[in-house]
Amino acid sequence: MQMSQFQFPTNEKEGNARENNVAKIKVVVRKRPLNKKELSRKEEDIVTVCDNALTVHEPKLKVDLTAYVEKHEFCFDAVLDEQVTNDEVYRVTVEPIIPTIFQRTKATCFAYGQTGSGKTFTMQPLPLRAAEDLVRLLHQPVYRNQRFKLWLSFFEIYGGKLFDLLNERKKLCMREDGRQQVCIVGLQEFEVSDVQIVKEYIERGNAARSTGSTGANEESSRSHAILQLAVKKHTEVKESRRNNDGNESRGKVVGKISFIDLAGSERGADTTDNDRQTRIEGAEINKSLLALKECIRALDNDQIHIPFRGSKLTEVLRDSFVGNSRTVMISCISPNAGSCEHTLNTLRYADRVKSLSKSGNTKKDQGVNSLPPISKDASSAFSMPVSVDIEDVYEPQQEMKVSDTG
Ligand SMILES: Nc1ncnc2c1ncn2[C@@H]1O[C@H](COP(=O)(O)OP(=O)(O)OP(=O)(O)O)[C@@H](O)[C@H]1O
């Protein structure tokens, strides 16, 4: 993949033009390598990748039991094969969005796919890389002078309930304020000024996630984990307001990015399981994945009504679906023949999301593809004058006109 040196826009007009060039929805597929177990079973790799296209070679049997292969071809904004590193995943997916966070964008990046397809492997490094770039930007005088700060929160949606992964899995509830802004009451947010601290919080949250049940992998594949990095304009404590839980608002959100490690997609099909709890969880996951698709559809059509109430997941992400938003979906697929059906389901879901981002998106996608990565050379890169109308910016912690959805 060819990377050219990123140049920040030199004025606001150019900045906005660039920002408009970053596609609203980007769909990327990542194929993982065959794992040891699959190799030992001599399973075949049935997925071939060529540029932005991939082919699934589905092994089938005719009625007379002769074997044949059915080919399914797909094309996405980017297809990353088993050789691609996590660094490259970051460059293709999240990096182009980072500068837009300072321009009031609320971005969402999520991984979708069956259990074991690599969602966690793909998602886990992304927030840290994003935090590195955000912190680097924040240390530039132009942002430091505006007293922008970075805040981190990490929570989980499990069985339709919210748990704070950085506060002993404390149960949280959602409320809507008078401006129909959703806020998660009691969610701990931490100011982070260096990447090492971000790393520690991420590790802490991940540990809280996996100790939530006896079978860590079971638990992780049945819950959605959401890590948010928010850039806020710092306000003095005396000016700050308190929400119903006594937490202080420490600034107004300028922009933010949410990373979602979704529950395994096939869990949505667990609705026929004999175990009642499993059925309920399956139905909840199904509901949230469908609702997510509906929201993305509405979002891309610039619809006024976004059906975010369809699930807890989409309610939580409400402010990421309105106004200036960006969405990156990373579909993770397993390459082995035994996963063929799940792989095809994942790719069809991704294809559906991609086709929802229909009109003009070809143009927008060219915009994304032509937007080079952030230069690590901060001196040349971060000279963009920033003009954010803070009064216009979403303010999460106003007094609550309450419809408690928690
Ligand atoms: N691209 C990759 N390269 C190398 N190893 C990978 C890759 N993707 C996934 N793996 C490995 O495959 C295994 C399963 O991955 P992972 O746990 O990320 O799956 P998952 O989709 O998050 O599953 P679940 O839904 O159960 O949480 C892990 O051991 C992981 O290290």
Image: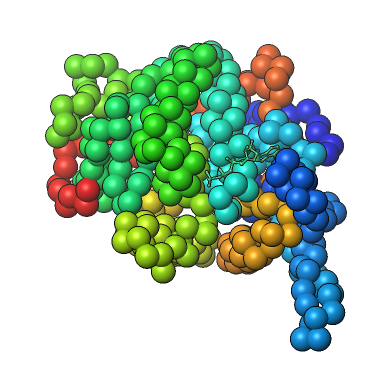
In depth, the one of 295 and 304 nearer the eye is 295
Quadrant containing ligand 1? top right
Residue 401 is left or right of residue 41, and the answer is left
Residue 395 lies, in percent from the top left, at 30, 36
State the count of labels: 0
Q: Is residue 234 above or below residue 35?
A: above
Residue 377 falls in which quadrant of the image? top right
The N terminus: image quadrant: top right
In depth, the one of 360 and 261 nearer the eye is 261
Q: Is residue 268 above or below residue 385?
A: below
Residue 364 lies, in percent from the top left, at 67, 54
Q: Is residue 15 visible?
A: no
Residue 236 lies, in percent from the top left, at 27, 16
Kindly identify the residue that appears in the image at 70 percent across and 30 percent down. 87
Q: Is residue 400 above or below residue 208?
A: below
Kindly identify the residue that appears in the image at 45 percent across and 38 percent down. 216
Kindly identify the residue that appears in the image at 62 percent across and 52 percent down. 331
Residue 42 lies, in percent from the top left, at 80, 51
Kindly identify the residue that appears in the image at 66 percent across and 58 percent down. 339
In depth, the one of 394 and 76 nearer the eye is 76
